[in-house]
Image (tube, helix red, strand yellow):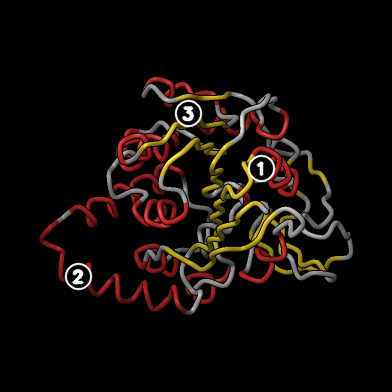
Amino acid sequence: MNAKIQRKCPLCGKDDVSSFLQKKELALVCCKNCGMIFANPVPAEMSGEFYDNLGTPFYLSPEKLECDYASVRFEREWRLFRKFCPQGMILDVGCSTGAFLFQLKSRGNYQVTGTDISKPALDYARSRDLGIIGNSFPDHNFGEIRFDAITFWAVIEHLLEPEKFLRKAAMLLKSGGHCFILVPNLKSLAVRLLGAKYRYIFPQHLNYFTARTLKRFVLTEHFEIVASGSMHFNPIVIWQDFRSKGDFVPDDQRAALLKRTTAYKQNPVLKPVKIIYRLTENMLSRLNLSDNLFIVLRKK
């Protein structure tokens, strides 16, 4: 990844920025107009081919697949999702190997479709009998199909032009349909404690949201906000990153940690520990200090 491209602010479109953080070759800047933090410049290769190359060693690693398809993997997202969308036609943008779609099919009356640009991951999703579109979401012609809900779980932070995706979602949703967005929280407890050492400040993430900038990202002419907050908390990540030298964490180590934390969630012996963990996570969520921010939008 040698060639670099310069970006304007993905939130307001201005190009007046100040330096915010440097982590090896990754430079984060702050927009002086709206306060959005984003990577600039970015590698020109952040495209479908890049995610194809990432697909086999990471998304299709046995550890990652086992955890993604575990019943506990999307428990928070599922609780949030079913509150607003108990049934209907669902599009998961950035569906990867299809794990969230699989959970929807297993738990409710949903007709599910996924779209992504990582061919190896999508091939696996198809093998699980899931409806898959192997095309860029903004460019795909959906015809007359309209959806009850569209999800962007851990997607918006990867996009060069995130507003283009949100506008396409507004076009494809039925009136009263919902859009679900989940992104890393730049003001989480983990980031406050670790700064640049936090593992999810890394080159694959191009956009870094706070609760304020995520709400500014909403297209108010199309949507109204019906819920927002934060979720997820991984103290093991904080401990490991605190002890690290601040290097980018290899994919195999990320997959191994995911397997480890999934095993903890499934272990009945750890029930007392999990109670303390949930109380801690609930407290952090109320303070918007959890690892990820979420926002639920309803189309006007």
Asked whether 77 or 247 is in front, the reply is 77
Asked whether 36 or 200 is in front, the reply is 36
**Residue 207 x %, y %:** 67, 56
Give how far apart the Cα atoms at labels 1 and 2 are.
Answer: 40 Å
User: Residue 79 shows which numbered tag?
Assistant: none
Mark 3, residue position: 121
Image depth: mark 3 or mark 1 in front: 1
Do the CB atoms of the residues marked 1 and 2 lie less than 8 Å apart? no
Amino acid of disc 1: Ala
Q: Quadrant of the C terminus?
A: bottom right
**Residue 151 x %, y %:** 54, 45
Mark 2, residue position: 273
**Counting residues from the N terminus, which is met first, the one under dot 3 or under dot 2?**
3
**Residue 217 x %, y %:** 71, 60
Is label 2 in a helix, a strand or a loop?
Answer: helix
Q: How many marks?
A: 3
In this view, 232 is above or below 56: below
In this view, 51 is above or below 194: above
Amino acid of disc 3: Ala
Q: Quadrant of the N terminus?
A: top right
Q: Residues within 10 Å of mark 1 (few under 14, many from 20)?
A: many
Mark 1, residue position: 169
- In the visual, does 33 lie left or right of 202? right
